[in-house]
Image (cartoon, rainbow, N blue to C red):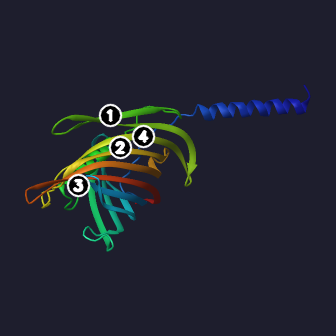
Amino acid sequence: MNSIAARGAICLCALLLAACSVGDKTIMLRFKYEPGTRLVYDQVSKRKVVLKEADSTIQDYSYTFNMIIEHEVRDIIQDSIAAVWEKDTWQYERPTEKDSTVIDTIVSERELLMDIYPNGRITNLRSATDESVEHLSYIKNFYEQGVPVFPSGELSPGFSWTQTTKVILPEETMEASTTFKIKSLAREGGYDCAIIESDGNLVIPVEPGSMDTLMISGLDRIHTTGLIYFAYREGMVVLQRERWVVDGTREEMKDGKKRTISVGSTTDVDFSLRSRTIQ
């Protein structure tokens, strides 16, 4: 074999070996929290909502809201659990309930405290301010059913897992499940990321608020699909894109009369890392 052919064979062999090594690459999916770590995210949500009573449309509108989400690791407690403070600030415009031609500008914020295991499991979620118990219950259910809890060990592209949750309702017990799959590995925003697909069916009860004169309650069935770009070396989410399709019902009791409303909505969510600092 002449030297040119030999070099060509060596290059081909090297390429084949490189291809094999990329395909067989394994990673560990774990959040890597350090006290003083501060992550700031931008979230843009575009939502379309249709409210109906029987066959009549009550409201049909679309709006976009922008949210800033701040995470700060306050402490590391037993078993490497991170004590995390979260502040969500958002603003949006939407039609008023009484007159859809009149637009209200809504500005809101909330602060949460939660304990997070390195695998992503969230426990002890509570309000840092005065978030209502009912809203907290909804958030807890959403996190429990739709947020990934990473499997242990080294994982490679193609690996998938399913999380299943039993939802106990007054008249029946339902099952919610979300499947996650490591689609591929790629660079995103300057980080080496695992791209994780998600496909889930969530079942979330809506509890009547203690201060709600209408005593609104109901149930949301939410089909979620999305992609998570997880920086596996730094242990954090860099980018997340999701779609939530909600098929829900609401029951109102006012002046002794019951009213049932169906809620249909589609929301496209874009969640991206703005900054990461460690003090």
How far is mark 4 from mark 2, CA to CA? 9 Å
Q: Earlier in the sequence, mark 1 or mark 4?
A: 1
SS class of the residue under badge 1?
Answer: strand
Residue 158 pos. (x, y %): 52, 33
SS class of the residue under badge 2?
Answer: helix
How far is mark 1 from mark 3, CA to CA? 22 Å
Residue carrying label 2: 146
Say which amino acid is labelled 2: Gly
In contact (CB < 8 Å): disc 1 and disc 3:
no
In the picture, which quadrant includes the C terminus?
Answer: bottom left
Q: Is residue 39 visible?
A: no
In contact (CB < 8 Å): disc 2 and disc 1:
no
Point out the residue furthest to the bottom here.
Answer: 102
Dot 2 crowding, Cα within 10 Å, few <14, some 14–19, many 20+: many
Point out the residue furthest to the top here.
Answer: 1
Residue carrying label 4: 199
Residue 164 — which label? 1
SS class of the residue under badge 4?
Answer: strand
How far is mark 2 from mark 3, CA to CA? 16 Å
Q: Is residue 157 above or below residue 207?
A: above
Residue carrying label 3: 135
Say which amino acid is labelled 3: His
Q: Earlier in the sequence, mark 4 or mark 2?
A: 2
Near-viewer residue (187 or 54): 54
